Image (cartoon, grey):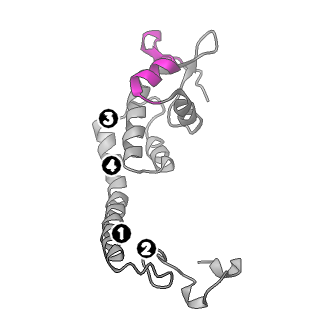
Amino acid sequence: MPSKVSPAPDRLLSVGQLASRSGVAVTALHFYETKGLIYSTRNAGNQRRYDRAMLRRVAVIKMAQRLGVPLAQVADALNTLPKRHTPTAEDWQRFSAQWRDDLSRRIDELLMLRDQLDGCIGCGCMSLKECPLRNHHDRLAEEGPGPHPPEQLAP
């Protein structure tokens, strides 16, 4: 929701200017705003205006998304900052440290998947019963083939 507190007018960008300078679509900026990732004010004509500091927030969001960090985790990280705070290098270090373990885990999983894919292509079995790629973490395999009632799916 747009804020009532207005930054200096010379620091304000229209949504089109923010989109152009950040390389992010206007619709994505509106979405980020609805999720509380970025903030705007309204001018006398009720048009959104963004403080230039939002450029840095959008850069952090884009970098995190490129790493595959879910937007909810990005929001959690940005919510640790004061509302109008421009993220600093120290903030990025803290965020990236939080996301590093998950990124390492995903890299390990992708490497394992890549290595299993090579083996699977070599054997050509594509066994629905035993293939670790096709039947990854099948919790109901020991229950036998076919559909299972939902109550059996509980962890």
Amino acid carrying label 3: it is Thr
Say which residue label 2 marks.
Answer: 133
Q: CA distance from mark 2 to mark 3?
A: 41 Å
Nearest the viewer among 2 and 150 is 150
Image location of residue 142, percent across then percent down: 56, 90
Q: For the residues marked 2 and 1, what is the alpha-carbon distance in whole angstroms?
A: 7 Å
Disc 4 to disc 2, C-alpha distance: 30 Å
Instruction: Of the two numbered discs 4 and 2 on the same chain, state the one appearing first in sequence.
Output: 4
What residue did someone put label 4 on?
A: 96
Q: Position of residue 66 (x, y in %)?
A: 38, 45
Mark 4 vs mark 2: in front: 2
Q: Amino acid at mark 4?
A: Ser
Give the residue at x 36% y 69%: 113
**Other-residue count near label 4 (Cα within 10 Å), few / some / many at <14 / 14–19 / ≥20:** some
Numbered label attached to residue 113: 1
Q: Are marks 4 and 1 in contact (CB under 8 Å)?
A: no
Residue 39 drawn at (x, y percent): 52, 28
| Mark number, residue 88 | 3
* Left or right side of 131 for 103: left
* Proximity of marks 3 and 1: CB atoms separated by less than 8 Å: no
Q: Disc 3 or 1, which lies upstream in sequence?
A: 3
